[in-house]
Amino acid sequence: MSIRAVLLTLAVLINLPALAQQAELDDATVAERTEAISQTLRCVVCQNQSIADSNATLAEDMRRLVEARVRAGNSDDDVRAYMQERYGDFVLMSPPVKPETWLLWFGPLLFVGGGLIWFFTSARGARDDLDEDDEA
C-alpha cells in the first residue's frame, strides 16, 4: 500500500464526522422548520404580519433567506439571531425586553396611564368649577 493511499484513507476517516453533520435535510423537514421560524419573524414592510403570512416582496426574500439558512444547517435560534442582527429587534414577533425596547413594551401603558391622569385631572377641574358656580 502506498503512502498516498494511506494518507487519503486517513483524511477520509478524519473527516467522516464533518461529512455526517452535513447530511442533506429532507424537503419536508426544511419546509416545516422554515414555516415555524417564519411565524416568529415580523415582516418589516407590513409590520403587523409574520413573514409567513405576508405577501410583500421583502417577506418572500426573507422566507428564502430563512430557508437557505435552514438548509445550511443553522439552528432555529441561529436563524432568528441572524435576522435580528440584520433587521433589528423589531423583526422578532416577540422582541426581547431590554433598555432599547422599553418604549416598545411599556409605551402603550404609559400612554394609557397619561390619558387616565389627564382625564381625572380634567374631571376634577370641571367639578371644582361647578362647585364655585354654585357658591356664587
Image (tube, helix red, strand yellow):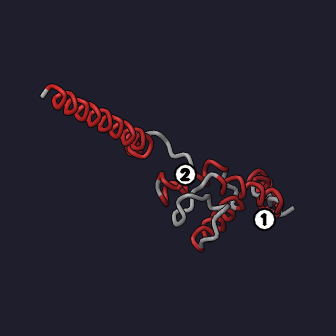
Residues at marks 2 and 1, CA–CA distance in whole angstroms: 52 Å
Q: Residue at x 77, y 50 (%)?
A: 17
Q: Residue at x 45, y 42 (%)?
A: 105
Q: How many marks?
A: 2
How many neighbours does mark 2 have within 10 angstroms: few (below 14), some (14-19), or many (20 or more)? many
Q: Is 67 on the left or on the right of 28, as rendered?
A: left
Rendered view: 57 above or below 96: below
Q: Residue 92, which numbered label?
A: 2
Q: Secondary structure at mark 2?
A: loop
Among numbered discs 2 and 1, the one appearing first in the sequence: 1
Q: Secondary structure at mark 1?
A: helix
Type of amino acid at the residue the image marks with label 1 = Arg
Which residue is tagged 1? 4
Type of amino acid at the residue the image marks with label 2 = Leu
**Viewer-closest of 29 and 37:** 37
Q: Is 90 on the left or on the right of 128, as rendered?
A: right
Expressed as whole percent of the image width and height from the top left, the position of residue 47 reads: 52, 60
Q: Is any atom of residue 15 visible in this view?
A: no
Q: Residue 82, which numbered label?
A: none
Q: Nearer the viewer, mark 2 or mark 1?
A: 2
Considering every residue shown, the one lying at the far right of the view is: 1
Expressed as whole percent of the image width and height from the top left, the position of residue 28 reads: 83, 59
Rendered view: 106 above or below 18: above
Is the C-beta separation of discs 2 and 1 under 8 Å? Answer: no
Expressed as whole percent of the image width and height from the top left, the position of residue 13 reads: 80, 53
Q: Is 74 on the left or on the right of 9, as rendered?
A: left
**Viewer-closest of 11 and 104:** 104
Q: Is 2 on the left or on the right of 90, as rendered?
A: right
